Amino acid sequence: MNKRLYIILLVGISLGACRNATQKTESTATDSLTVSDWALLPFEKVDSLNPVLVPTPNETFFDPIWKKEVKWEEKDVFNPAAVVREGKVHLIYRAEDKLGKYAGVSRLGLAISEDGLHFKKEKHPIFYPSNDAQKKYEWEGGTEDPRIVESPQGGYIMTYTAYDGKTARMMLATSKDLRNWTKHGPVLGEGKHLNTWSKSGAIVARQKGDQVIAEKINGKFWMYFGDTNLFLAQSDDLIHWEPLTEADGTLKPIVRPRPDKFDGQLVEPGPYGLITDKGILLIYNAARPMPEKKNALVYKAGQILMNGQDPTQILARMDEPFFVPDKPYELTGQVNNVVFLEGLVYFKKKWFLYYGTADSKIAVAVH
């Protein structure tokens, strides 16, 4: 979630549950679809184990910029990406220390599970700001909120957010093993969109067994992104991207908030765009004001179906959220009343959905 873009004092309790999967959707292309025709439902929170990942306050790491040992996940862990590698779930998660002028630098850690539920963390972060070409974008806010898919040629493509204290920029990195990464810089390039607030890149991909592999549509790779409206970019190689723009050169909105619904304040992509036989299924995070609380937002999640041959066209959209904050660890934390979905894998014949809770911990739900 974008806690810096909006000044939010989130208090109170938001009650909710997964909604009926047969409920009618808002549709811009057809009125015949119901949620049960296309959505991935239901998801059940694993209450017996959640949260499945919490901070390890005393774990240390020698930071190359601070040039000292820091407690790199002392403050919180949240907003993870997930992939299946070598028969195990690999969770790449955001962690914060308590240092610096932004009350915490973000880095990415790695946790591994044989059952999708019980995780063992690696001792040191696997991705972080360093004295490299991207330091000017990543320091001192850090590296945040990853999304990951596999490349058709092998290896992994990760989008993440770099925060320099003023602007959030959507960035891209690649790896063969999830531990050693090559940074490729801002997704929107270093030209006219360099200082455009951008984040949350969800690449369109197809599930093949336990892999989720980027796939071209009409000769191009596609990526949904943004944390106000949803925008769209295209690529020939998964490294270099070109956003769709209006005639005046500004980013072209593809999906907008709806003022009278759960996504009335903002919409932001979840894990990736999943190609199905119905179209492109996109799980998205959304926020709206809480009428009973001044300057307060509540984050919930919805699903939307885009045209599989035209990624700009909405086919169907949920009227109600399918995932809401209703557990104590979701209602209270660094930022209250938040579920933020970023990791989705097909593992042991089930879908595992990993999400940040109140910007503080990580939980899982299973379909």
Image (tube, rainbow, N blue to C red):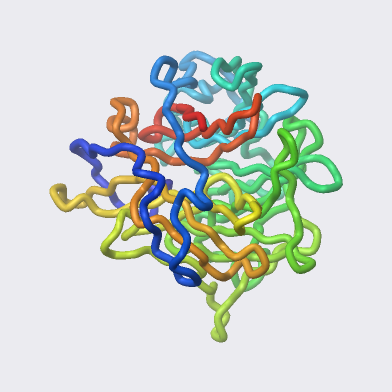
Write the residue at 44% across / 22% down.
46
Write the residue at 29% across / 51% down.
7
Write the residue at 49% across / 13% down.
58
Q: What is the residue that sits farthest to the front in this orientation?
A: 32
Write the residue at 34% across / 40% down.
324
Tell which of 134 and 174 is nearer to you. Answer: 174
Give coordinates of residue 54: x percent, y percent.
Answer: 46, 20
Q: From this view, report whether residue 197 is shown above or below residue 337.
A: below
How many labels were placed on the picture?
0
Tell which of 165 and 298 is nearer to you. Answer: 298
Tell which of 81 and 7 is nearer to you. Answer: 81
Task: Say whether residue 77 is visible.
Answer: no
Q: From this view, report whether residue 97 is shown above or below residue 274.
A: above
| Res. 125 image quadrant | top right
Q: What is the residue that sits farthest to the left in this orientation?
A: 292
Q: What is the residue that sits farthest to the right in this orientation?
A: 153
| Res. 147 image quadrant | top right
Give coordinates of residue 347: x percent, y percent.
Answer: 65, 28
**Side of 156 where 119 appears, left or right:** left
Give coordinates of residue 30: x percent, y percent.
Answer: 48, 69
**Side of 256 where 185 appears, left or right:** right
Q: From this view, report whether residue 357 is shown above or below residue 320.
A: above
Tell which of 124 and 94 is nearer to you. Answer: 94
Q: What is the residue that sits farthest to the bottom in this orientation?
A: 247
**Side of 202 where 302 appears, left or right:** left
Task: Say whether residue 146 is visible.
Answer: yes
Give coordinates of residue 340: x percent, y percent.
Answer: 43, 41
| Res. 245 image quadrant | bottom right
**Side of 157 where 52 appears, left or right:** left
